[in-house]
């Protein structure tokens, strides 16, 4: 087990509707949290993990985000997957970006994530637990009780081997998806055309018993609305 991660994709094309009015004049990845744009928190973690190439998809107020990325001085290269013509959702965005990404598996990170590492680097932790023979995707998940700012009912159950299954309707699940995952190129084989959700790919992997989770040992913050910013900044100031 273990993997070398050559490239990462940062999902940054969403409309940021829940973050209005802050996103009326800027894309959500450029909303500032704890002194820096949201996307920079993710880029910092990717850089610390030693990944050499990053693809960022853009759609809403794409020019502003591209200008910000062009000014970055990082130890990785940055390529843009342009979705100005059509917003492709999470799954479709991955399919469009795939030719720009190198290596296998690929790290996928939502641009509105903020997390702190536990005893070890979280991305490297994922890489060490990758099993190419048995996995199509490995999701970093966190126990719902530790998901700061999250108000959902959880996303997944996880068995002792790490296999994930969905929360049942009307029930509560103990694990929340953090927006950070390793995916094999296999996961995208036979993917639909056009816009679609990654959930379609995950459900297929669950049916084949090839969707796995790894419990996050650090902090994770759901920064989805303006009201979530101050509590997140307060918690980060104590780290």
Image: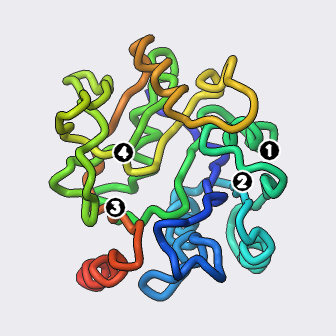
Question: How many residues crowd around disc 4 within 10 Å: few (fewer than 14), some, or many (20 or more)?
Answer: many
**Quadrant in which residue 218 is drawn:** bottom left
Label 4 to label 3, Cα distance in Å?
16 Å
Q: Which of marks 4 and 2 is nearer the N terminus?
A: 2
Q: Are marks 1 and 2 in contact (CB under 8 Å)?
A: yes
Give the residue number, with chain letter if any, for mark 4. 177
- The residue under label 1 is 100
Where does the image place residue 82, in percent across and percent down from the top left? 81, 55
| Marks 4 and 2, how far apart at CA | 21 Å
Circle 4 — which element?
strand
Q: How is the image coloured?
A: rainbow
Q: Which mark is residue 55?
A: 2
Category of crowding for the residue at label 1, using alpha-carbon neighbours closer than 10 angstroms: few (below 14), some (14–19), many (at least 20): some
Marks 1 and 4, the one that precedes in the sequence: 1
Q: Which of 69 and 29 is in front in this view?
A: 29
Residue 29: which numbered mark, if any?
none
Which residue is found at the position 50% from the left and 71% from the top? 41
Which numbered disc, 1 or 2, marks the residue that appears first in the sequence?
2
Task: Judge whether 117 appears above or below 6 on screen.
Answer: below
SS assignment at label 2: strand
Q: Earlier in the sequence, mark 4 or mark 3?
A: 3
At label 3, counting other C-alpha atoms closer than 10 Å, the crowd grade (few under 14, some 14-19, many 20 or more) is some
């Amino acid at each position: 087990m273990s993997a070398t991660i050559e490239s990462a994709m940062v999902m940054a094309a969403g409309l940021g509707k829940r973050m209005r009015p802050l996103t009326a004049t800027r894309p959500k990845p450029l909303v500032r949290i704890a002194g820096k744009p949201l996307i920079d928190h993710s880029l910092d973690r990717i850089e610390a993990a030693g990944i050499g190439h990053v693809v960022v998809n853009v759609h809403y107020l794409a020019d502003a985000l591209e200008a910000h990325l062009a000014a970055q001085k990082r130890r990785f290269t940055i390529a843009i997957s342009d979705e100005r013509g059509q917003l492709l959702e999470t799954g479709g965005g991955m399919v469009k970006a795939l030719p720009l990404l190198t290596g296998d598996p690929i790290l996928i990170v939502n641009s509105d994530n903020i997390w702190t590492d536990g005893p070890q680097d979280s991305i490297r932790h994922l890489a060490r637990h990758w099993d190419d023979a048995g996995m199509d995707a490995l999701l970093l998940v966190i126990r719902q009780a530790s998901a700061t700012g999250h108000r959902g009912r959880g996303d997944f159950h996880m068995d002792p081997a790490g296999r994930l299954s969905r929360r049942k309707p009307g029930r509560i699940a103990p694990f929340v998806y953090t927006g950070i995952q390793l995916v094999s190129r296999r996961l995208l084989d036979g993917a639909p055309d056009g816009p679609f959700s990654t959930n379609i790919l995950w459900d297929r992997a669950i049916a084949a018993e090839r969707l796995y989770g790894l419990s996050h040992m650090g902090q994770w913050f759901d920064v989805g609305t303006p009201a979530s910013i101050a509590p997140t900044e307060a918690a980060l100031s104590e780290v």
